[in-house]
Image (tube, coloured by chain):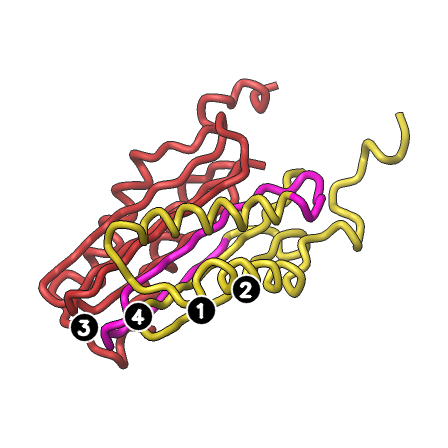
Chain colours: A red, B yellow
Amino acid sequence: MEDLQATEEAAFVAEDVNNIIKESIDSILLNATYTQQKVGQWTSQIVESCMKRTTALNKPFKYVVTCVIMQKNGAGLHTASSCYWDNATDGSRTVRWENKTMYCVTTVFGLAF
Amino acid sequence: MSAKDFITEPAFNAKFRQGKAQEIISEVLKTKLTNVTYHPDNTSTWTREIADDIKGKLKEMGLERYKFVVQVVIGEQRGEGVKMGCRCFWDPNTDSYATAEFSNGSIFCVAAAYGIYLY
């Protein structure tokens, strides 16, 4: 019964996901300047890229990936999340990224089933 | 060993309903954010309180076997551009989400709540 021994692999590993998110954002936003027309496309590409790579880890998890891109204008931004889940198996990872013209905050939530 | 032990999905009336959840979220945002002004010190407290409030109200909906994730973003209104997107890898038969926005002259706020079924 190999399934029953999988408890170590069945916990959300934040480290692997951290790298995945950073690489996804870098590949799409690295030298880009904030453009109103492209922003929609960028958020879609980032979440899709994160999604593809986290699901490729082949773990028994459901994922929710969110991405917020904001133009640098001197304004403040606050995010918070509150989760009702099983602390032993579920987890999340948030990565804050910025360049000269914009901020990007991407979060991946992993929920075991 | 009754038939109840073998169900793999929630009954129709025990599913995460998007409309009801959206009402709950809008209600919380309106109650907490009408007439507030952005201030860097207390805005982060507000985001946390709103997220916890929404989570509490979703728990009161009484949906068994559902896990909730609530995300709240509050920003200062200064004419900047913002875009928020999400993708979910789940079972569309049982899982769903709801979002609501609120804005006034000095802040904008987006709240998203995701309901995930535990088999």
A99 sits left or right of B7 in the view:
left
Chain part drawn in magenta: B60-88
Identify whether A66 is placed above or below A102: above
Label 3 marks a residue whose chain is A
Type of the residue with mark 4:
Ser
Q: Residue at x 54, y 36 (%)?
A: A85
Label 1 marks a residue whose chain is B
- Residue bearing the label numbered 1: B102
Quadrant of the snapshot with the N terminus of chain B? top right
Q: Residue at x 62, y 57 (%)?
A: B92
- Residue bearing the label numbered 3: A34
Residue contact between numbered discs 4 and 3, judged by CB atoms under 8 Å: no
Q: Secondary structure at mark 1?
A: strand
**Residue B82 figure quarter:** bottom left
Q: How busy is the neighbourhood of tag 4: few (under 14 within 10 Å), some, or many (20 plus)?
A: some
Q: Nearer the viewer, mark 1 or mark 3?
A: 1
Question: Do marks 2 and 3 both belong to one polypeptide chain?
Answer: no
